[in-house]
Amino acid sequence: MPRLSHTLDLAPVDRGDVARAVSAVHEVLRSARFDDTGELILPSEQESERLERQAEELGIVPAEAEREERERRNRARLADLPDPEQPAGAPDGDTERELWEQDRSDEAAVREATLTLRLLSGEHLAPGSTYLATEVDADGRPLFDEGGEGWLGTDLTVTAWEESGVCSVDFSMREDATSAEDGAPPVTIGSVVHDRAEETLTVRADMRFPMESAMARWGSSLLRARITARVELRGWFAAAAGGATAPPVTLEVEHRLVRAHGYVVPAPGPNGLWSVSGDLSVRGRGLARPLVAAVFWALVRSVRRAGSPSVAEHSAEFVRGWDDLARALPELPGFLGEVAESLATARPRNRG
């Protein structure tokens, strides 16, 4: 069975800070208000900028200088890429460099996008209420509207909402603007379930790949994969303290031909840090077994040929991001309280 594993030393976080942050998130959600068209009422631009600056100062989001440095490193990596020869029979311009440039362009579009939320039916946070979340550009158009390069919005349905118990939301990602009306199947459907009493978070998703081939026609189960991720907070802190427990973070991916299982487990590390180990195992089914093994082997070889400094760089960047959040966590409830107050007192903007 092909397998990958990795271990990182991460700054610990306080369990009480996590619980207070969860309460603050609920406060933010309760404070949301919607105008007569159902659109979420946002704070003024001046207030939004103030909150963004405060989030940067606390380390909750990367500062502008850090974002610019990441972009500079991305451009440097792009400049180092060779110009590969066009494979025979490949679409025009389908080179490694152009694909990389398209990825950078998409990332920039997402960074500049604005998330909009519209209450479509029901009372806010009441079971049965429905919403539409959409990423829009400066002109108010959904991202990837042209060319079908991504979903245009996510339909949300509250299935349960008890802050001291279970809060559950179903989601359905639209592939085009009319998919909700014409009955076309969504790209991805699933649910997010938070059980506060049990301290668990479970995410399930049934994904459909937006493509077909000679082996997998539209609607084939070969174009679908099911993903389940689960976090158990009690188990996490028990393991981080050195107790024996089942893996507190698990990931399952199921497909007709492939099955993957991953888990993350913390343990006491050096100098008071958490030593967090991740493991991913992939198994092919039936005739796909040798193919999966070969692809996995090639992937591992490719990563190693890319040079350990690149892998180490990505790991270090993740650790820096985690450490920033760990330092900011004690201040996060207070900051979210300000966000909640800003939402509660926000006034509808003029739609000139």
Image (cartoon, grey):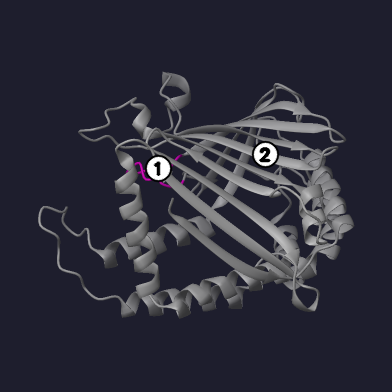
Mark 1 belongs to which amino acid?
Answer: Asp
The residue nearer to you, when weighing 77 against 318, is 318
**To which quarter of the image does residue 213 belong?**
top left
Give the SS element for disc 2: strand
Seen in the picture, residue 119 relative to 80 is either above or below; the reply is: above
Which of the two discs, 1 and 2, labels the residue nearer the N terminus? 1
Task: Name the residue that disc number 1 marks.
Answer: 145
The label nearer to you, 1 versus 2, is: 2
Q: Amino acid at mark 2?
A: Thr
Q: Name the element at disc 1.
A: loop
Whether residue 352 appears in this view of the structure is no
Rendering coords of residue 288 (x, y %)? 32, 40
Q: Position of residue 236 (x, y in %)?
A: 76, 53
Residue ID at (74%, 72%): 269
Q: Residues within 10 Å of mark 1 (few under 14, many from 20)?
A: some
> Farthest residue in the left direction?
88
Residue 133 x, y percent position in the rendering: 59, 39
Which quarter of the picture shows residue 318?
bottom right
The reply, left or right, for residue 132 in relation to residue 200 is left
Q: Is residue 257 above or below residue 54?
A: above
Point out residue 126 in the picture as x, y percentages from the top left corner.
77, 25
Please say if 240 is above or below 180.
Answer: below
Give the position of the C terminus as an image quadrant. top right
Mark 2 crowd level (few <14, some 14–19, many ≥20, 10 Å Cα): some
- Tell which of 104 and 327 is nearer to you: 327
Judging by the rendered image, the residue that carries numbered circle 2 is 202
Q: Residue at x 39, y 68 (%)?
A: 303
The magenta stretch is 143-151
**Magenta segment, principal secondary structure?**
loop
Q: Quadrant of residue 119?
A: top right
Decide if residue 271 is in sight here. yes
Determine if the magenta segment contains residue 185: no
